[in-house]
């Protein structure tokens, strides 16, 4: 309590009186806005406060369904911990939708009342943290745009119960609460009548306005304009083929129609792989191009239109010899292949090889293939334009989605996994559980238009029967059903005759049902590509759909790590980066990703156990990039194309050269050259410090540099240039840092030589660079890739907050003479500097003590055993001010993070917190460590989850 009281005084002093020493933390008074630069949103702050509070009280005039849905997962987790909240809202201006009120009534740990005050327009959020309260007051209602995108001003302050302002706010809330009326289903029913009357009047006025506005012809969006420009540039250069990579729902078909309109071919062929989308595609072209009805024709198994200007054909029909040979090979001027990632199949290759069109365009959302066939080559490596899912969401081209990762059905302590039998997948208790989750997380819109993906045909049929028996009208569709029956069922879903279609993977691609507003995943994610394809079924914009709801039932599946990969497009194969992504709430514009606490732990566990850097994964991504570039990729290519982390792929076989040899690439470097690449890969490629990289880069282009001029070189690059940093870099490059009494890992190489203050590359390095072009190429590539990675680290400080470091990194970045990482263990004091390395979740179950966060900026920490108050290191800790002891805290969640620790910044002991204890008959000293900078919320919750 004393510590909190002191911290509150300090935060108010620095935040409201004297800001010269202001440090932002959870107690600091500050302005809360939606900030694209820092990626902070009002939603982030609300979720952080909710996750750490003991109770909460909101007074909010306007609440939208989308705003409430963004908090449903954290509210569910709070309910499981018995934490309750209160909300006062209103019916002011009839803004709030009756559906939103009904959703409020579903949340078990919420008590809601409706204000009786005239003109109720407040926006206040109160969080009780036990020893203090945090309060946010400002402009943000609980709506999607207010929480994530709008320009909002909110002031947040913390205080204890003695604070006069807090007392006033709490008193005002309690008075309003007492005067408000309970939210009930009866109240909602009465309100709904008034709401519908007003909305009907609004619709009548809008309809009248719409009829007076002249219908505007369809025009290309920004993506389509850019793609059309690039296609035209390719044709001007004489290219005859091109590939468009565009996320589902971004208007690929309209784009094709616009380009055909520009080119004006005499005859045009559009090829699809499913008959269901043929008519829709043709209608798009009619809308854009116009012309006579007889200009358009269809070629399928049932309809054979031949002598037309614009022919729309299924691949199954046009690829047959009896149909294909009816046309001369130059009959079509322009051919478009939809879903062209299939174009390596024999049927498509037959078309590509037979017809000699003036221009061939391929369109796909997912060009990546796992069968080593090169789609890019089929289109002459001409990627005219690319827009992936995340960018399309940022550009507001798609409907945003709210993803809810929920834990799957549990029975007798066992959660569904890869081996669960069918009878367990469809038993009545699981169906009840599924309905409960569907009802809780709901959908946006007046009527449900849902799609459910499951694992097996029998499961789809059984679940459809059981859900229908419980009042949800559902039908199953599988590959066994005829096209006519599929079309009939899809039409029923669109018209609202049925609520759900249940399928296995029938709708992974090629089906366009824009009205879908809820997708339910009742199967494990076996492919991130398939996940995106299935997700894409609901991402098309549709009138009355503000966002798509995705409910993913997560079991004990080995492939759970694919979920964050699919959601974020993360291809680095870096486990640390992937773990960080599951802590982010807002992705790509206003898309929201939330995992229930238990489901989140299963994702984390799957990432921990997965072999992300398997040769299979590396080979797949390597070949994909090679095919796209039409050459051997360099490490910098992986960075530029947001693919594998160079450190991951280069270190898989010690160095990138060894990896390329494994891939049977035509390349040769001798043993000395490979040993040098071993060093660069292990010690410098990470980019955690730029000094050595910059020196090597300079010496490659210049014969020498005087030692006295190195400071100037470092200064010109904006990096630390103290004498110790220069000596540290020289110690690394001379390899002296690595030489100890017991080992000399790099004894077979030399990198530099220092002769009378003149620094040059060693004779070995010069020989390699001059005699072996492959070595020069890969060495320079490593240096460039390391410098690009280095942009992620601070240049004015040895360490960057929340980046990962090893004990060896600490020794190097702090310019120690030798690598002393093997003797640091938990901590080590040297030269008045002490790194502290903490594994937060220890394996030993009998530990009587455990390093524990008690707040985002305070850790309860234990010394080594055998320590007392008068021990040398404890005395140095207690006298840290007088001795100018500099302490740095590094932490990892558990042993799965191996040797890398997050850097949490400088810290110091709280002076009166030292306690001498006994552990297993040995003395030990505990203390409270105060961090200079509070741990950012997502990492704090990840560590303390």
Image (spheres, grey):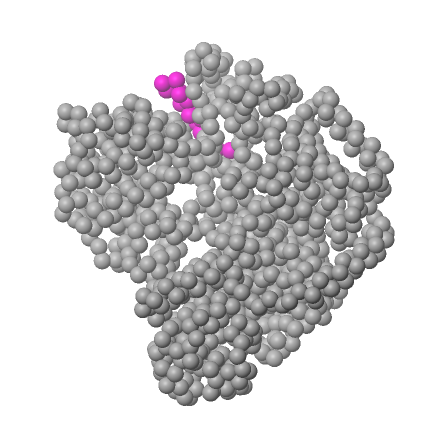
Residue 418 shows in the view? no
User: Magenta stretch: residue 720 in it?
Assistant: no
- Along the line of sight, which residue is nearer the eye, 512 or 609? 512
Residue 684, position in %: x, y?
31, 38
Q: Which residue is drawn at 51% across and 24% down?
A: 932
Task: Say above or below: 422 vs 279.
Answer: above
Side (left or right) of 413 relative to 113: left
Residue 786, position in %: x, y?
32, 41
Side (left or right) of 619 relative to 516: left
Q: Which residue is drawn at 20% across and 40% down?
A: 701
Task: Say above or below: 124 vs 573.
Answer: above
Where residue 442 sits, quadrant-wise, is bottom right
Q: In which quarter of the image is the N terminus?
A: top right
- Along the line of sight, which residue is nearer the eye, 694 or 71? 694
Residue 896 shows in the view? yes
Where residue 384 sits, quadrant-wise, is bottom left
Task: Say above or below: 613 vs 446.
Answer: above
Where residue 240 sits, quadrant-wise, is bottom left
Q: Which residue is drawn at 47% across and 28% down?
A: 905
Side (left or right) of 459 relative to 244: right
Q: Quadrant of the C terminus?
A: top right
Residue 413, position in %: x, y?
63, 49
Please give the range of residues in magenta: 826-840
Q: Which residue is drawn at 65% across and 59% down?
A: 545
- Along the line of sight, which residue is nearer the eye, 873 or 219? 219
Residue 470, position in %: x, y?
75, 64
Task: Say above or below: 373 vs 148.
Answer: below
């Amino acid at each position: 309590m004393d510590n909190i009281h002191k911290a509150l005084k300090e935060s108010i002093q620095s935040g409201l009186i004297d800001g010269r020493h202001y440090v932002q933390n959870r107690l600091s008074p500050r302005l809360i806005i939606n900030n694209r630069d820092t990626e902070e949103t009002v939603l982030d702050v609300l979720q952080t406060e909710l996750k750490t509070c003991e109770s909460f009280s909101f007074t909010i005039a306007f609440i939208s369904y989308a705003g409430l849905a963004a908090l449903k997962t954290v509210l569910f987790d709070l309910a499981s911990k018995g934490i309750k909240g209160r909300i006062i809202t209103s019916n002011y201006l009839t803004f709030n939708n009756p559906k939103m009120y009904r959703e409020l009534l579903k949340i078990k740990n919420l008590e809601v009342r409706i204000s009786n005050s005239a003109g109720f327009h407040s926006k206040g959020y109160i969080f009780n943290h036990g020893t203090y309260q945090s309060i946010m007051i400002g402009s943000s209602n609980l709506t999607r745009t207010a929480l994530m995108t709008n320009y909002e001003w909110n002031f947040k302050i913390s205080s204890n119960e003695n604070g006069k302002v807090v007392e006033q706010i709490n008193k005002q809330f309690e008075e309003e609460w007492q005067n408000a009326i309970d939210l009930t289903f009866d109240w909602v029913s009465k309100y709904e009548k008034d709401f519908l009357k007003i909305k009907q009047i609004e619709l009548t006025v809008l309809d009248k306005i719409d009829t007076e506005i002249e219908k505007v012809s369809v025009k290309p969006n920004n993506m389509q304009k850019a793609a059309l420009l690039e296609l035209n540039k390719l044709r001007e250069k004489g290219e005859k083929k091109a590939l468009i990579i565009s996320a589902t729902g971004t208007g690929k078909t309209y784009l094709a129609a616009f380009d055909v309109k520009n080119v004006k071919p005499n005859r045009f062929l559009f090829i699809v792989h499913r008959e269901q989308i043929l008519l829709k595609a043709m209608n798009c072209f009619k809308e854009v191009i116009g012309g006579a009805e007889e200009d358009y024709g269809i070629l399928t198994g049932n309809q054979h239109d031949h002598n037309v200007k614009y022919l729309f054909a299924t691949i199954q029909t046009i690829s047959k010899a009896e149909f294909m040979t009816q046309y001369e090979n130059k009959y079509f001027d322009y051919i478009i292949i939809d879903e062209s990632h299939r174009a390596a199949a024999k049927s498509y290759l037959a078309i590509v090889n037979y017809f000699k069109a003036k221009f061939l365009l391929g369109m796909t959302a997912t060009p990546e293939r796992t069968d080593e066939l090169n789609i890019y080559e089929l289109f002459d490596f001409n990627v005219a334009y690319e827009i992936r899912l995340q960018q399309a969401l940022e550009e507001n081209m798609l409907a945003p989605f709210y993803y809810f990762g929920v834990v799957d059905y549990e029975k007798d302590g066992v959660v569904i996994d890869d081996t669960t039998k069918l009878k367990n997948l469809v038993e009545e208790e699981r169906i009840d559980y599924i309905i409960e989750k569907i009802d809780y997380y709901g959908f946006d819109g007046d009527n449900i238009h849902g799609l459910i993906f499951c694992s097996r045909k029998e499961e789809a049929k059984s679940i459809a029967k059981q859900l229908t028996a419980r009042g949800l009208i559902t039908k199953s569709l599988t590959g066994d059903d005829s096209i006519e029956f599929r079309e009939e069922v899809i039409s029923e879903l669109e018209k609202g005759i049925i609520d759900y279609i249940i399928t296995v993977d029938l709708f992974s691609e090629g089906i366009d049902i824009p009205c879908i507003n809820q997708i339910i995943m009742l199967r494990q994610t076996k492919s991130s590509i398939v996940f995106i394809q299935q997700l894409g079924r609901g991402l098309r914009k549709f009138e009355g759909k503000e966002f798509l709801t995705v409910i993913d039932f997560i079991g004990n599946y080995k492939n759970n790590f694919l979920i964050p990969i699919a959601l974020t497009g993360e291809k680095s194969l870096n486990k640390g980066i992937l773990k960080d992504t599951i802590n982010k709430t807002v992705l790509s514009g206003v898309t929201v990703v939330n995992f229930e606490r238990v489901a989140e732990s299963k994702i984390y566990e799957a990432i921990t156990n997965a072999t992300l850097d398997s040769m299979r994964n590396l080979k797949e991504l390597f070949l994909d990039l090679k095919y796209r570039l039409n050459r051997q990729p360099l490490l910098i290519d992986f960075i530029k194309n947001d693919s594998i982390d160079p450190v991951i792929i280069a270190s898989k076989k010690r160095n990138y050269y060894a990896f390329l040899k494994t891939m049977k690439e035509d390349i040769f470097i001798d043993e000395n050259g490979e040993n040098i690449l071993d060093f660069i890969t292990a010690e410098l490629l990470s980019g955690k410090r730029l000094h050595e990289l910059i020196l090597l880069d300079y010496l490659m282009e210049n014969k020498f540099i005087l030692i006295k001029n190195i400071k100037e070189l470092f200064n010109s690059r904006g990096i630390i240039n103290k004498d110790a940093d220069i000596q540290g870099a020289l110690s690394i490059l001379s390899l002296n840092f690595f030489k100890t009494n017991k080992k000399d890992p790099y004894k077979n190489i030399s990198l530099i030589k220092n002769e009378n203050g003149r620094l040059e590359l060693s004779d070995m390095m010069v020989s390699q660079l001059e005699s072996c072009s492959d070595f020069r190429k890969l060495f320079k590539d490593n240096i460039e890739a390391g410098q690009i990675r280095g942009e992620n680290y601070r240049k004015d400080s040895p360490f960057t907050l929340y980046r990962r470091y090893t004990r060896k990194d600490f020794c190097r970045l702090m310019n120690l003479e030798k690598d002393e990482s093997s003797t640091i263990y938990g901590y080590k004091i040297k030269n008045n500097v002490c790194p502290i390395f903490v594994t937060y979740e220890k394996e030993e179950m009998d530990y009587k003590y455990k390093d524990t966060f008690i707040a985002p900026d305070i850790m309860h920490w234990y010394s080594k055993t055998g320590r007392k108050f008068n021990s040398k290191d404890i005395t140095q800790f207690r006298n840290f001010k007088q001795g100018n002891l500099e302490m740095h805290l590094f932490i990892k969640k558990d042993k799965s993070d191996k040797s890398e620790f997050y850097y949490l910044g400088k810290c110091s002991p709280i002076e009166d917190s030292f306690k001498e204890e006994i552990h297993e008959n040995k003395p030990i000293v505990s203390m409270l460590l105060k961090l200079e900078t509070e741990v950012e919320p997502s990492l704090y919750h990840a560590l303390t989850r």
